[in-house]
Amino acid sequence: WLKPFRLKSDGSYVGACPPFRGLSFQLLVMKTLVQEESIPVPKGIKISIKSKIVEVSGKHGTLKRDFKHLPIELYLANSGHEVRAKMYFAKSKQLSMLRSVCSHINNLFDGVQKKYEYKMRLVYAHFPINATITNGGGTVELRNFLGEKRVRIVNMLPGVKVEKSAGTKD
């Protein structure tokens, strides 16, 4: 009852019908043996990689990121002027992790080189929110949030300063 057939590259077959007509079968996907991505380290940035934990230091502070959950190999190359990420025996969907890791490391570089300023606004539909800035910009107190009687206190992280602009309402 087994009849000879041959699979073509597009998934169709040549020859007699496959022996198990009712069952669907999946083509085997080729795995890439080794894939490697590299990122140049900008000047003025110090980077250290130890057991998939990347620590980047620059003029605006230090950032740390953990990549232990990914099956990749991270190391410094070119005497510390280049970061390389390597992955072995991966399918195409898994290879996308490599570029993502490189993008995360590039974002770490940007984070220690540039300062960020976020502009936020309080928006409400029915209950007017009242925000008070205390501790010299280190704490925000929110009153009447969704009509609640309790005061919500939000402490800012170290290095974060909150200012209320005079030109905008609320």
Image: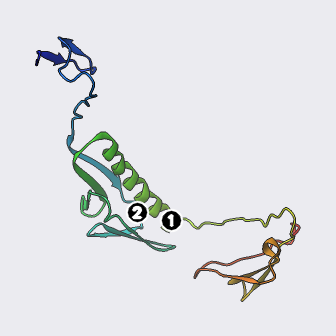
Residue 145, numbered circle: none
Residue 21 at x, y percent in the picture:
25, 21
Distance in Å between CA atoms under marks 2 and 1: 14 Å
> In the rendered image, which quarter is residue 149 located in?
bottom right
- Tally the numbered discs: 2
Helix, strand or loop under label 1? helix
* Quadrant location of the N terminus in the rendered image: top left
Residue 163 at x, y percent in the picture:
75, 76
Helix, strand or loop under label 2? loop
Amino acid at circle 1? Gly
Q: Which of marks 2 and 1 is in front?
A: 1
Amino acid at circle 2? Lys
Residue 107's place in the image compared with 150, above or below, is above
Residue 43, numbered circle: 2
Residue 137 at x, y percent in the picture:
71, 82
Residue 111, numbered circle: 1
Is 137 positioned to the left or the right of 82 in the image?
Answer: right
Residue 130 at x, y percent in the picture:
84, 76
Callout 1: 10 Å neighbours few (<14), some, many (20+)?
Answer: some
Residue positioned most to the top: 15
Residue positioned most to the front: 1
* Quadrant location of the C terminus in the rendered image: bottom right
Task: Work out whether residue 32 or residue 161 is closer to the camera in this orientation and state it.
Answer: 32
Colour setting: rainbow
Label located before the other in sequence (2 or 1): 2
Identified at 28% across, 64% down, the residue is 80
Is 62 positioned to the left or the right of 20 in the image?
Answer: right
Task: Work out whether residue 44 or residue 17 is closer to the camera in this orientation and state it.
Answer: 17
